[in-house]
Each structure stands twice: as structure tokens, then as C-alpha cells.
Amino acid sequence: MLDDPAAELDAAAWARVFQEAADLGVLQVHLSGGEPAARRDLVDIVASAHGAGLYSNLITSAIGLNERRMLALRDAGLDHVQLSLQDADAGSADHIAGYAGGHERKIAFAGIVTGLGLALTINLVVHRANIDRVEAMIDLAASLRAGRIEIAHAQYYGWALRNRSELMPTRDQVDRAIQVVEERRRGLVIDMVVPDYYARRPKACVGGWGRRSLNVTPSGRVLPCHAAETIPQLEFWSVRDYPLEKIWLESPAFQAFRGTDWMPEPCRSCALKESDFGGCRCQAMALAGDASATDPACELSPFHGRMRELASADAGAPIGAYVYRGR
Ligand code: SF4
Ligand code: FES
């Protein structure tokens, strides 16, 4: 959920949150959005993350960032930049992003990032409109001197769920793309998130609920994952009201699905429950209507067949118009 800009935490509040996070043992901060570059005080925010000893990663669309501003961010202690590309074909990339000229701008921005000596990850978001060009997308990312390439098949919660019938690839397309990635892994650092709708077992979403990471929204609500607000019954505490440690240890949202006691069958008696933690709570909410259900990506879930049916129905539909956040 996007916050009203007037309700966002100021730079001093972010500095306190970063210090509290570092005191809790957090090592990295990922500055995301919306678009973090929309904050005029982004340099101060990065400086306070650096001052707290956190490794900082700026996740950006490149809008609002020129070389002068990137230099200031680097000098403030920024460690890493993550940039997503929508396609290798500029016309298609601009169409997917809904932003004319955006692709060209991102290519130029990648050059600024590496020219300043900052580490760069290129995130390739893969779906039906671009999956057949995944090899060209990898070539493009490699040519931009990305130290790491992330192939992220769209995951269907939040806005991607609203666009699922436009985004879902076919099973054959996914299999071919996985093969291409495996072949291109030699000599390149490529991470891949495969699409849940064609999986047999779920991923350990966010490394397990309330185990390894937390999200702080621009206005200060603390979430166990970026999509947790899609689960209606959860109560989120704010860093405006409580120290981060208390929120992490005691807030209802973090307690709701931490550990394994909350699990129903078949997860409760499954040997994999300490490996995948029952999968993704937001996906269970979206497809089973119950955030405590077994993730439908698991073939032991009673909703798994339904998930497969949805995937093939959506993948067979013509691609229509995308629905964009905030437009
Ligand atoms: Fe994971 Fe639950 Fe499926 Fe077992 S039953 S593999 S714990 S999602
Ligand atoms: Fe929320 Fe997976 S996205 S638990």
C-alpha cells in the first residue's frame, strides 16, 4: 500500500529506525518504494543507514537520479544499486513499464552506477510478454556490467495479482526460460525465482515469517513481508509508537505466523515445515482465502489443482491492458 507522502517518516525518524535495526542485528537495508529517489532527503537517509553500519541497497527505477545525485549518494555511503529492466526490446520495455523513454534512461543510468564504482544488480522481471526474450535480457544485463542478475518471475500477490491474466506465461515458456538460464549461468552470477503457479513445492517466502527480515513502510508501519497488508486480520504496529525490537518480538502481525505452531495439516506433520515454513502467507490469503492455509503452490494443498487451472486459463488468454499502481 502506498502511503500519503505527507505521512512519511522524516529523515531523523529513519535514522533512529536504522540504529534500532542495527542494534537488533540487522545487516542490510533495502531502500524501496514507490520510488525512493522521490525523497529529497535521500542522501541524508542513506548517510544515516551507513552511519548505523548497515549495507545499503537502493532499489530504483532510475527516475529522479542523475550523475550528480548518484555521486552524492555514493559519497554518503551507498553500497549497491538494484535496477529492474522490463525487456531487451526498448518498445516493449516502455510499454510494460507504461513510461515512454524509460528503458533508454535505465540503460544510461546503469552506466552511471558502474562508472561510480557502485555494485549493480539488474533485476529482470519475467512474464508472458517478455519471457521468450529472456536470453536477450540476460545479454543486455551482462553488457551493462551487472555484478549479479536476478531473474524474477512475477509472483502473484498485490499488483501482479490484479494483472495475472496479462502476465502469466505458459508452462512451456517457463520450462524453456529455466533451461536458458541454466545454460547462461556459466560465467555469470544469476539468481532465479521460479513461478509458484508451476511449482510442486512452495518457496520459503521471506525466509520464514518473522525469522529473518522486516519491512518498514514509508509512514512507519512494520510488516513481516512487503505484501502483508493484503492479509486483512493482521494488526501492524508503527515505529512511531514502539521501538523496533518490541515490534519484532511482540507485535501481533509478527507473532501470527512465526514458527510452526500456527500450522494446519498437512504442514503440521510435514518433514519440510522447518525448510519452507509452509510457503507464502499472502499467496494462501489470495488463493485459499485463508492466510493460515498451506500455500497452494504445494502439491499437498487442497487448492493446488485450482492454482494450476488458474495458471493455464490465464496463460491462454490474450494479453490486455495492464493495471498500474497509482494511475
Ligand atoms: Fe511445505 Fe506444508 Fe507443503 Fe510440507 S505440506 S511441503 S510444510 S507447504
Ligand atoms: Fe507475504 Fe510471501 S509475500 S508471506
Image: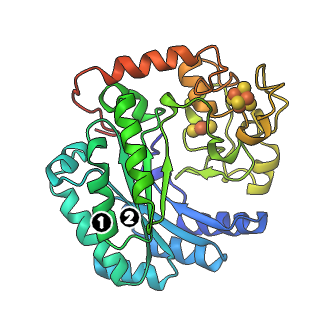
Give 222 or 128, whichever is nearer the viewer.
128
Q: Is residue 77 left or right of residue 54?
A: left
Give 262 or 303, whichever is nearer the viewer.
303
Whole-percent x and y of residue 114? 36, 79
- Measured in 3D between alpha carbons, the distance from the residue under mark 2 to the one under mark 1, in whole angstroms, is 6 Å
Scheme of colours in the image = rainbow
Picture quarter with the C terminus: top left
Q: Quadrant of residue 143?
A: bottom left
Give 284 or 76, whichever is nearer the viewer.
284
Q: Is residue 273 left or right of residue 286?
A: right
- Label 1: how many residues lie within 10 Å, few (<14), some (14-19) or many (20+)? few
Mark 2: which amino acid? Ala
Q: Is residue 312 left or right of residue 195?
A: left
The numbered mark, 2 or 1, whose residue comes first in the sequence reads: 2
Residue occupied by mark 1: 64
Q: In the rendered image of this protein, does residue 289 appear above or below residue 121?
A: above
Which disc number belongs to residue 37?
A: 2
Report if the CB atoms under discs 2 and 1 are less than 8 Å apart.
yes
Query: Which residue is pictured at 76% across the width and 26% down the height?
Result: 267
